[in-house]
Amino acid sequence: MLRLVTRPALVIQPDFATEIAAAAKTPLERCIQCAKCSAGCPVGFAMDYLPNQIIHLVHLGLEDCALGSNSIWLCATCETCTTRCPMEVDLAAVMDALRQKARQKAGSRAGGKVGAFHDAFLASVKRFGRAHELSLVGELKLRTRDFFTDLGLGLKMFLKGKFGLLPQRIRGVKQVRGTFRH
Amino acid sequence: MAENTYSYYPGCSLHGTGKAYDLSARAVCRHLGIELRELQDWNCCGATSAHALDSWAAIALPGRNAAIAERAGLDVAVPCAACYSRQKTCEKALQEDQQARERLEKEMSFSYTGRARFKHLLEIIVKDYGLERLREKLTAPLTGVRAVGYYGCLLVRPPDVVGFDDPEDPRTLDDVILASGAELANWYAKTDCCGGSLALVRPDVCGQMVARILQQAKEAGADCIVVACPLCHSNLETRQPMASKLLRTDFEIPVLYFTEMLGLAMGLPPKRLGLNTHLISPRKILRRKPQAVGAAATVGGPAQRGPERQEEVAGEEEADG
């Protein structure tokens, strides 16, 4: 269902489309708005702008609208859009480029809870070289200040031995940290 | 070196919530005579979070693993679909992007020859090892169990990165289900997304996506869902209560790793396969009594492919004669 969402102050950034096309390394100017991507998007039902509308926003240079959408953070990178696009536009890569641009402009505030999850995940990777689930969840709860969601589920999983208690730090953790510094 | 020797990249999940996948994968491979050698000091592939926020780390993290694999010199078995997707994306970059390859070779101190290819465990068992050889080892068929194969996203999409199977109607898990003697139910949610990393932070969205998949499985009359990814497994299991509430029903559908299904069909003890760690008990599968094929065919849902497919297979075997 297409919903018309209005936003105040439409500011056009003329270089936005070329910038995102270059970052995503994909010819998004080829989009013909067939909306096949949106038809197949499994998270479309929860998005404020559907995938084809996001591409349209990029074409039009409406940077604030695109970067302020919840779509780019709800995108689960399932690659359905990329696989089906008849013009071979890699939408999943466009979504990645938009997320990174949003972070570039607004810092870690961009992305809300979803962004906080990614931060917690990568924090664990930087600390141990691997994602340690227990400490990841702990860090996520601290960042979102949401301690009670899934508490019962977490306990059940813990009792089933699903969480490795002790994190293992790999020897090459410095090299892993190096991949984030550039 | 034995032809059935592979490097093994378990990924972070298999050391945690995906423990059953690790246990069953190792047990099944041991039984098949496939040797798995865990990569030395492997690191996280970066999963979704890396490519969402940092495009260089998204390539360099799997790049470090590629360097380790290169030194080990063997093809790498990867059980997790997300890790597989990330490693294949990196592999593509190493093969097609000269700038990326030079930078990775410099930063990870290695020379890429491409001799160590990353392969999903499903591909190794079904394609490399082969269904015919596999069937010979499956001496305890899961007769009377009706299963659907759930592929999810990253195992089959996009085809130019991962594609060892069709992105819209894949068949490799279906082949595993049939080989294990279970009945294959045809359904529409084969490649629908489970919500992936949205599970913890947007359970409201993820729950709806999981509900859709479970409803399809129920309508196909499935006793269980067979998967090839620890995150899909986790989402389909942990969000069942929420999905039940959303659709005002009571889903109680066990989710099995394909290696657990194969392990059971090999007659391996359930505990060795990690089946005791499931949140949705698979005891219904373990206690199932064989049913006549005719009786099962009347269970509601889309036309089942099981009996026809089995006849096809029988036909091929006769032709080989």
Image (tube, coloured by chain):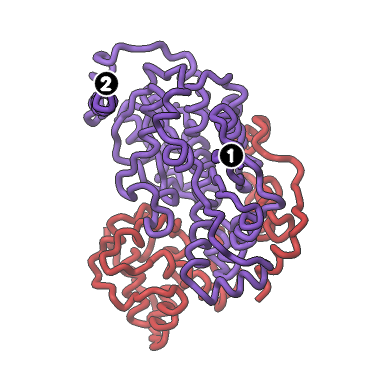
Chain colours: A red, B purple
What residue is shown at x 46% (from left), y 72% (from top)? A98
In this orientation, which residue lies closer to the viewer: A181 or B143?
Answer: B143
Circle 1: is it few (<14), some (14-19), or many (20+) Cα within 10 Å? few
**Residue that badge 1 annotates:** B2
Please identify the quadrant where the C terminus of chain A is shown: bottom right
Q: Amino acid at mark 2?
A: Val
* Residue B297: image location, x then y, percent: 25, 20
**Residue that badge 2 annotates:** B299
Residue closest to the far bottom: A14
In this orientation, which residue lies closer to the viewer: B251 or A124?
Answer: A124
In this orientation, which residue lies closer to the viewer: B130 or B104?
Answer: B130
Examine the rendering and report whether any part of residue B300 can be seen.
Answer: yes
Q: In the structure shown, which secondary structural element does the residue marked by tag 1 occupy? A: loop
Classify residue B1 as left or right of residue A4. Answer: right
What residue is shown at x 41% (from left), y 11% (from top)? B289
What residue is shown at x 37% (from left), y 56% (from top)? B159
